Image (tube, grey):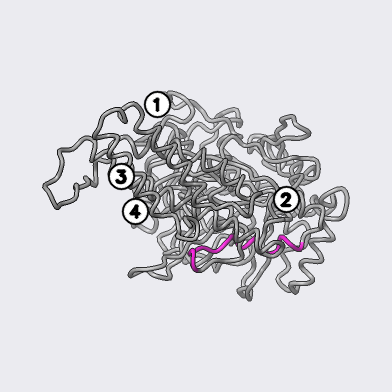
Amino acid sequence: MSDPSRYDLREEPWSPVRVAGRSEQLGFRQLCLRAHEIDDLALPVPPAASALMRVLTVIAARITGLDDPDLSADEWLALRREALERPGGFLPDAVSEYFDAPGRADCFGLFDPVRPFLQDPALADQCEKRAGVNKLAGRAAGNNPVWWGPFADIDPRPLPADQAAWYVLVQHFYGPSGRCSARTVDGESEANSMAGPLRKTISFHPLGRNLYESLLAGLPRLTQDAPDEDDLCPWEEDQAPDPRKRPAPVTWPGRLLTGRSRHAVLLVAGADGRTATDAYVTWGTRHAPLAATDPFVVMNTVRSGANAGKRYPREADGSRALWRDLDALLLKSDEVAGFRRPAVFDDLNDLPPDLRAALRVRAYGFDQDGQQVDRSWFTSVTPPLLRWSEEQAPNAARRISLCREAAEQIANALGHAARVAWAEATLPPPREGTKIKLDAKRHGPWKQLAYDAYWPLAERTFWHLIDAPGAQPYRAFYQEAEKALRSAVGGAVKEQKAAKALNHALAIVRKVIPAKETA
């Protein structure tokens, strides 16, 4: 075992999990040895859990041999089914072979002086200033909210080592763009960075009955020719990335899932080796990102305008319920709607039947802007849903898509109608023959109040419509929009202007209902 002062992530209990309903903390080795006993990860920081799932997925591929690019599609799927049907989870000898390989003791040391986990020791010489643990952990800074308490740079309380590891992961995957600590390499100093590969995204992970099933179900299959390059994760490399060199090609699965960071980090260990007292956080590369699609994100497509055809990851929205993304997980693709489901979902129907029937989906989202502002993070879980996938039940999948689209269209009309109603009820009447002019910056309170009331009602109606294939979705969602709009207007409806505005707003929303549902 490595020097305890290096905080060996293979052995130290740094990752919270749930086992039979109780909480435990485990290191990498026990995470793998006991994966079949672990219900799920339990990190209280969803973006750290999202990043750790990608790290563990690659380790699972290494341990099972599912990272072999020479396997045909049929061979790969058969090997995965064999692993899933074998009792006892990962083979202990294979786990030991991976974690005890030469050099692994150092590369999993959180404070290792030569090769710290996912860090670059050169930053101690290349950066004049440290960023601090408050910056690393998202404690109050700039426009960000206070996440974990009233910390300040004048009192930078040490960060426990386990939490420091979580935030190293968050920085590499979700780190900001823009101003950062200056880093000087070969005499040239730069002080800005590019956004992490998952910044402001929501990702979707298959969730099995235990962590072992989740990792193997969530392993993406190689679907194109592999680059002629060794597939190495950052901790498997001999040294930290050279910021002057162009990043290595995106290979599968290691570099695809773990090797696309834009940042560089270095923790400063406390004297006890159990805390981080400071941190360097800066840019990791000046080169443009290599083209790659994360297999856990929904890819949206711009459908019109100058950027028509451009694809981009669906963004996280802390106010958006998970059911509104269901059709993007169940349909193989929908070019009309403009999205492509996460690639990892393409092979879920080849899972053993019992796992397929039980499989849920966990979403991890980090609502951020593209630069420095972090608004909220969240996680949610679907019920078992593969029975509705397009491969198994195409009519059900299309029904779900239709209902979701109806809910969205009614909502869009509701938002516009609420703005119109507020303007008509509060502004002077326009000149005869003209329409009231809406202020683009002043929406009034009714729009948000209507949305706050509508979406919970719409979710309840959505699940009812799934079980009632003959029901008319637009009419059903209109009824909920009417309730929401009346709730938003509230007691003001007693005034003649407000009552008239409400009736006009309801007429605006009714226009969205297609003729076949109004007959």
**Residue 72, how many percent across, how many down?**
75, 74
**On the rendered structure, is 466 left or right of 503?**
right
Q: Secondary structure at mark 2?
A: loop
Q: Are marks 4 and 1 in contact (CB under 8 Å)?
A: no
The percent coordinates of residue 473 (x first, y second) are: 53, 52
Which badge, 4 or 1, is on the more N-terminal residue? 1
Which quadrant is home to the N terminus? top right
Q: Which mark is residue 359?
A: 2
Q: Callout 4, which amino acid?
A: Glu
**Which three-letter amino acid code belongs to the residue tagged 2?**
Leu
Q: Which residues are magenta?
A: 336-350
Q: Is residue 31 above or below residue 262?
A: above
In the rendered structure, find residue 504 and report the number of the disc placed on it. Answer: 3
- Determine if residue 156 is in view: yes
Give 110 or 390, whichever is nearer the viewer: 390
Q: Which residue is mark 4?
A: 190
Mark sitting earlier along the chain (3/4): 4
Q: CA distance from mark 2 to mark 3?
A: 46 Å
Is residue 238 found inside the magenta-colored segment of the image? no
Q: Amino acid at mark 3?
A: His
Q: Is residue 83 rendered to the left or right of residue 186? A: right
Name the element at disc 4: strand
Pair 3/4: label in front: 3
Viewer-side label of 4, 1: 1
| Sequence order check, earlier mark of 2 and 1 | 1
Query: For the point 33% across and 36% down, which residue is it?
Result: 446
Read off the residue under disc 1: 152
